């Protein structure tokens, strides 16, 4: 019976990740294929060549995204986007969803001061328990000044397995530990619930923050 269980688990470890990968890829391909609805019916693959081409929508979506990036990157395109965002900001429910999605996208995929800049270890939700936090800014506003802490860092602490939700924390650099890993690697660790663990440089005991009494 023990051999049966061992072989069964070994087989699952091969087929389960493969099956999940196939399902996810199929979902993404089907999702991108819906972009074909943007084309007039007479210009769709089934009308031009008499058959549907799976994945053609992926190429169309990537082309559309690339062209959008080219347009937005220039001065005129940025003005058009600004007008469009101004319009969306006047719609009560839409502006909340759009602004949240935009800020998260900028933090994960963007560059500059609005992105996740560094990865830190912090003791949360209590002393003795450690989790990962992403530095979003080290700028000092009124809220940071009221804390009366030195070297305040704004941290976003994501939840597992959905890193788009989480908590905002202001912490002193004396109470957190900076990690020498990439943001992408830390996100993988969060999403996997700690199953995927990136290689982390060994921390010196003296670098760990002292527990407050």
Image (cartoon, rainbow, N blue to C red):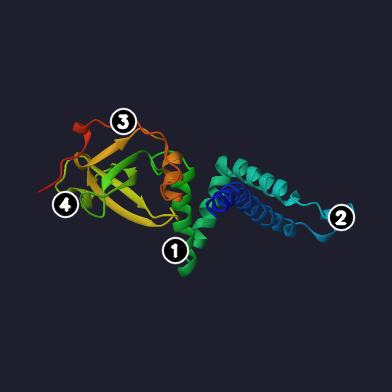
136 relative to 20, above or below: above
| Residue 128 percent coordinates (x, y) | 22, 48
Q: Which mark is residue 96?
A: 1
Residue bearing mark 4: 146
Nearer the camera: disc 3 or disc 2 = 3
Residue on which disc 3 sits: 202
Q: Nearer the viewer, residue 181 or 83?
A: 181
Q: Are marks 1 and 3 in contact (CB under 8 Å)?
A: no
| Residue located at (61% from left, 49% from top) | 11
- Count of all numbered marks drawn on residues in the image: 4
Which residue lies under the disc numbered 2?
Answer: 51
Q: Residues within 10 Å of mark 1 (few under 14, many from 20)?
A: few
The answer to the question of whether label 1 and label 2 lie on touching residues, with beta carbons closer than 8 A, is no
Instruction: Tell which tag, 4 or 3, sits nearer the viewer.
Output: 3
Q: CA distance from mark 3 to mark 2?
A: 57 Å
Q: Secondary structure at mark 4?
A: helix
């Amino acid at each position: 019976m023990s051999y049966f269980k061992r072989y069964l688990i070994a087989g699952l470890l091969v087929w389960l990740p493969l099956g999940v990968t196939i399902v996810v890829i199929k979902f993404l391909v089907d999702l991108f294929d819906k972009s074909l609805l943007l084309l007039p019916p007479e210009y769709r693959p089934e009308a031009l060549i008499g058959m549907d081409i799976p994945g053609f929508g992926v190429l169309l979506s990537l082309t559309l995204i690339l062209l959008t990036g080219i347009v937005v990157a220039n001065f005129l395109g940025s003005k058009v986007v600004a007008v469009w965002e101004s319009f969306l900001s006047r719609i009560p429910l839409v502006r909340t969803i759009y602004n949240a999605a935009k800020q998260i996208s900028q933090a994960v995929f963007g560059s500059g001061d609005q992105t996740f800049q560094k990865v830190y270890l912090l003791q949360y939700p209590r002393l003795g328990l450690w989790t990962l936090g992403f530095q979003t800014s080290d700028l000092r506003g009124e809220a940071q000044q009221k804390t009366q802490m030195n070297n305040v860092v704004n941290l976003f602490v994501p939840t597992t397995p959905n890193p788009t939700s989480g908590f905002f924390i202001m912490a002193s650099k004396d109470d957190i530990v900076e990690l020498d890993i990439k943001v992408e690697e830390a996100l993988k660790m969060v999403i996997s619930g700690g199953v995927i663990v990136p290689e982390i440089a060994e921390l010196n005991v003296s670098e760990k923050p002292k527990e407050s009494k």
